[in-house]
Image (cartoon, grey):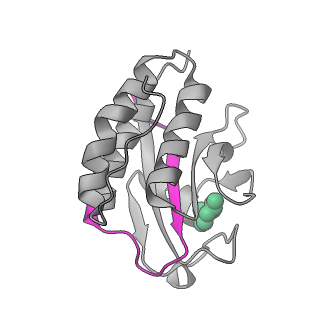
Amino acid sequence: MADELFIPSDTNRKAIYEALWPQLQSVVAGESDTIANTANVMAVLKEAFSFLWVGVYYVAKDHSNQLVLGPFQGPLACTRIAFGRGVCGTAWKEGRTIRVDDVDNFPGHIACSSKSKSELVVPIRRNNEIIGVLDVDSEHLADFSEVDEHYLEQIADLLGKLNYA
Ligand code: SME
């Protein structure tokens, strides 16, 4: 794994995601621990894009029908989200990526931080089963596009392939 991240000084997010992709693959290839790898992937995303919050919620293994907070970067966050609640619980329930341009217009949005204005949540699948979600929050309205959707789905796919034994 490279000691330092290379982030192009580019305002084009597509170019940044493209530059990050091989580095993310290299980061996770050098380590077998899933929490360590997931934590580093969140750190890379936070550093590259300065998102307000980026993290993972996992489907809890305690049969509570809730998501539970995993590795993240950003302000303090709620630890549990019920199935079907908020953007995260809805993405889990509906099994699809949800992009919210204005969180105030999303019924049931859970405001972990009052600074969050827009949000993108991508399910993480392992063998076709949803095991968690990747959640990204921004301080700006409508900060996410199809480009973020595309690359964060690719990154969620990478997270789903980690070792969850
Ligand atoms: N806003 C999310 C909750 C998680 S925080 O943003 C970190 C939601 O509505 O599910």
Q: Is residue 75 above or below residue 35?
A: below
Q: Is residue 120 above or below residue 16?
A: below
The spot of residue 10 in percent (x, y) is: 29, 61
Q: Is residue 24 visible?
A: yes
Q: Is residue 114 above or below residue 162?
A: below
Number of on-image labels: 0
The spot of residue 4 in percent (x, y) is: 46, 35
Q: Quadrant of the N terminus?
A: top left
Q: Is residue 123 left or right of residue 68?
A: left
The spot of residue 26 in percent (x, y) is: 37, 25
Q: Quadrant of residue 76?
A: bottom right
Range of the magenta residues?
126-147
Q: Is residue 144 magenta?
A: yes
Q: Quadrant of residue 56?
A: top right
The spot of residue 17 in percent (x, y) is: 30, 50
Residue furthest out toward the bottom: 105
Residue drawn at (47%, 49%), measured in percent from left and top?
45
Q: Is residue 80 left or right of residue 35?
A: right
Residue drawn at (45%, 16%), measured in percent from left and top?
30
Nearer to us in this view, 77 or 36: 36
Q: Is residue 49 left or right of residue 82?
A: left
Q: Is residue 6 magenta?
A: no
Q: Quadrant of the C terminus?
A: top right
Q: Quadrant of ligand 1?
A: bottom right
Q: Is residue 92 visible?
A: no
Residue drawn at (52%, 62%), measured in percent from left and top?
51
Nearer to us in this view, 54 or 89: 54
Q: Is residue 70 above or below residue 137?
A: above
Nearer to us in this view, 129 or 37: 37
Residue drawn at (68%, 45%), measured in percent from left and top?
69
